[in-house]
Image (tube, rainbow, N blue to C red):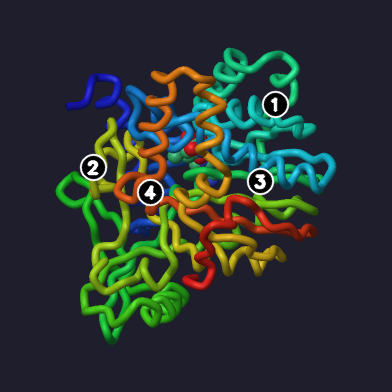
């Protein structure tokens, strides 16, 4: 059940969508729909005031599960910053601000602070939440390094770019495959309600689907999945100013050959509303998160197109193990057994295969720099891409 403000917000979003659908001759591609549902000013899930992360929100991410995640990412950052001598960190999509705070606190003790910790986030209310978190948990000498940007830096810089669970929010095209044609799924108004309707796919989307169809085995007629046309352009736009350093991506996803397996015939779209995951993006537009898994082969191709070297690809579990999460647990527990037991539970959530350990992957791109990264030393999955 929705409460009154939620019901009113949903009604406003639906009215806006109806107008946009009417203006587009009665049909919006799913990609356009997802864009509006997540980002329409004042209305979209990331542009309006939903609580989103953590307790009382819609979903939980690795930094919300445990400070161990940020501590390990900090160790990876330290490796890069130490080789560069100095540098900046740009975090894209910083959520509640926890990851930023945890990284800076650990980098401080490692003696490897960046000159600046920039945050680029499209969500105004999350930026506010980040500001509150940083002000509350960071000492002044760390607070002054954090700055919020309205767009990725225009000037080139050395350092790192980080993004945890941001790529899964990039709007995707949804398609339905037949041996002799491809359809694009879109959204119409039917009997006053949002409903799905297929149209012939554009030549560009049909061609992309033909390429994808060769990667995971033969698809039956009616196979539905999704594809992110803007992945390469978007990653390029947020990484182009990195001169020397690393881009680290974390998200749930698969190499293309596993993503587009014939048995995954309904795609990977997932919505999050009040800690419940479901598969209907038309249900609560503006009130729920809408995500799709990341095709890591596309991400790898985007890295090369943007002039990076693909340095590592592994599961979250191996990434954290490579960065000595066990050591971080000892440091954080500081001899307190109860605290250690709590951290051990959190580590299990981050690392067990049935939890976040395998679904979530880490990928590293390097530019103007060549060094082995500890987070990718224990397991190299690049051959699966
Ligand atoms: C699922 S949350 C993850 C938050 C955080 N990284 C974490 O792990 O807890 C997605 C974050 O990315 C931001 N975001 C979504 N799309 C974005 C985009 N296109 N550009 C910048 N930030 C974006 C959201 O506002 C939100 O802060």
Residue denoted by label 1: 109
Label 4 residue SS = strand
Q: Residues within 10 Å of mark 4 (few under 14, many from 20)?
A: many
Q: Nearer the viewer, mark 3 or mark 2?
A: 3
> In the image, is residue 381 above or below residue 289?
below
Q: Residues within 10 Å of mark 2 (few under 14, many from 20)?
A: some
Looking at the image, is mark 4 or mark 3 earlier in the sequence? 3
Q: Separation of disc 4 and disc 3 at Cα?
A: 21 Å
154 sits left or right of 32 in the view? right
298 sits left or right of 223 in the view? right
Q: Residue at x 68, y 64 (%)?
A: 306
Label 3 residue SS = strand
Between 172 and 308, the residue placed more toward the observer is 308
Residue denoted by label 4: 291
Q: Residue at x 58, y 28 (%)?
A: 102
**Percent x, y of residue 366:** 70, 58
Residue denoted by label 2: 283
For the residues labelled 2 and 1, say whether their Cβ atoms are less than 8 Å apart. Answer: no
Residue at the outermost bottom position: 180
**Percent x, y of residue 236:** 65, 58
């Amino acid at each position: 059940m929705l409460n009154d403000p939620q019901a009113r917000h949903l009604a406003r979003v639906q009215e806006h969508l109806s107008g946009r659908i009417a203006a587009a001759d009665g049909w919006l591609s799913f990609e356009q729909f997802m864009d509006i549902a997540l980002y329409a000013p004042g209305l979209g899930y990331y542009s309006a005031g939903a609580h989103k992360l953590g307790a009382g929100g819609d979903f939980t991410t690795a930094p919300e599960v445990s400070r161990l995640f940020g501590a390990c990412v900090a160790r990876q950052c330290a490796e890069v910053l130490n080789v560069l001598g100095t540098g900046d960190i740009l975090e894209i999509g910083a959520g509640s601000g926890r990851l930023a705070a945890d990284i800076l606190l650990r980098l401080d003790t490692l003696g490897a602070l960046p000159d600046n910790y920039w945050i680029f986030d499209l969500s105004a209310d999350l930026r506010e939440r980040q500001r509150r978190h940083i002000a509350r948990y960071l000492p002044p000498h760390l607070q002054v390094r954090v700055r919020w940007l309205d767009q990725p830096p225009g000037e080139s810089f050395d350092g790192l770019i980080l993004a945890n669970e941001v790529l899964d929010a990039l709007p995707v095209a949804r398609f339905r495959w037949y041996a002799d044609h491809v359809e694009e799924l879109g959204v119409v108004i039917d009997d006053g309600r949002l409903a799905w309707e297929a149209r012939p796919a554009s030549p560009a989307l049909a061609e992309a689907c033909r390429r994808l169809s060769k990667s995971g085995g033969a698809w039956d007629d009616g196979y539905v999945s999704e594809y992110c046309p803007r992945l390469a352009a978007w990653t390029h736009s947020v990484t182009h100013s990195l001169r020397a350093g690393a881009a680290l991506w974390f998200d749930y996803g698969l190499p293309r050959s596993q993503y587009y397996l014939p048995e995954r015939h309904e795609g990977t779209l997932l919505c999050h509303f009040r800690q419940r995951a479901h598969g209907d993006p038309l249900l609560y537009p503006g009130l729920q998160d809408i995500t799709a898994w990341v095709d890591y082969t596309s991400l790898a191709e985007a890295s090369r197109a943007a002039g990076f070297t693909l340095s590592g690809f592994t599961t979250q579990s191996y990434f954290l193990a490579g960065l000595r999460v066990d050591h971080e647990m000892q440091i954080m527990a500081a001899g307190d057994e109860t605290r250690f037991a709590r951290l051990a539970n959190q580590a299990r959530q981050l690392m067990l295969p049935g939890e976040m350990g395998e679904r979530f992957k880490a990928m590293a791109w390097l530019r103007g720099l060549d060094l082995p990264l500890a987070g990718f030393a224990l397991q190299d999955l690049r051959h699966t891409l």
